[in-house]
Image (tube, rainbow, N blue to C red):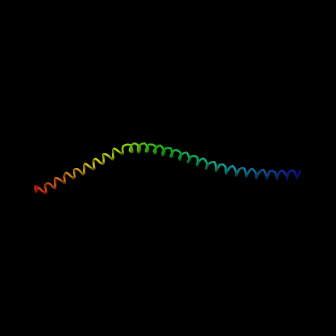
Amino acid sequence: MADDNDSLRVEIGFIRRNLEEVHSAMTKIAAALERLTRLEERHAHTATALDRAFNAISKLEARVAAMERHQPMQKLTTNWVINGVWAAVGVVGAIAINKLLTGTL
């Protein structure tokens, strides 16, 4: 009977240690699950932010494409304006030289 009690105590001790190990493992699993949940939440926020960024890039690409389509005409217009300014400067210069040469300033 004493041997039975001793063997039961030993087995109960083993069971107790096993339960403590299970409890420790469960605590670690709970902590890991909590970290995983936080990481998933961050990932979701990052994915949402990336979607917003890609949408903004798509809109910008459309705007840049429209600007590139109009660029040749804008270059032509810019050249016309610059040539017009130089022509006006030339006319004013010619008038000034004419006035200087004729002495009617």
Name the residue at 72% across, 50% down: 22
Q: Which residue is drawn at 61% across and 48% down?
A: 36
On screen, residue 37 versus residue 1, left or right, reads: left
* Residue 104 on image: x %, y %: 10, 55
The image position of residue 94, as x and y in percent, is 18, 53
Q: Quick check: 53 left or right of 73?
A: right
101 lies above or below 84:
below
Q: How many labels does the image show?
A: 0
Between residues 44 and 62, which one lies in front from this camera angle?
Answer: 62
Asked if residue 3 lies left or right of residue 68, the reply is: right
Residue drawn at x 53%, y 45% is: 47
Along the viewing direction, whichever of 78 and 58 lies nearer the viewer:
78
State left or right for residue 105 relative to residue 31. Answer: left
Instruction: Give the quarter of the figure containing the C terminus.
Output: bottom left
Tell me the residue at 74%/50% (across/down). Answer: 19
Image coordinates of residue 70 in percent, x first then y, are: 36, 43
Q: Which of these two is toward me, 81 or 53?
A: 81
In the rendered image, the residue lying farthest to the right is: 1
Q: Position of residue 18 (x, y in %)?
A: 76, 51
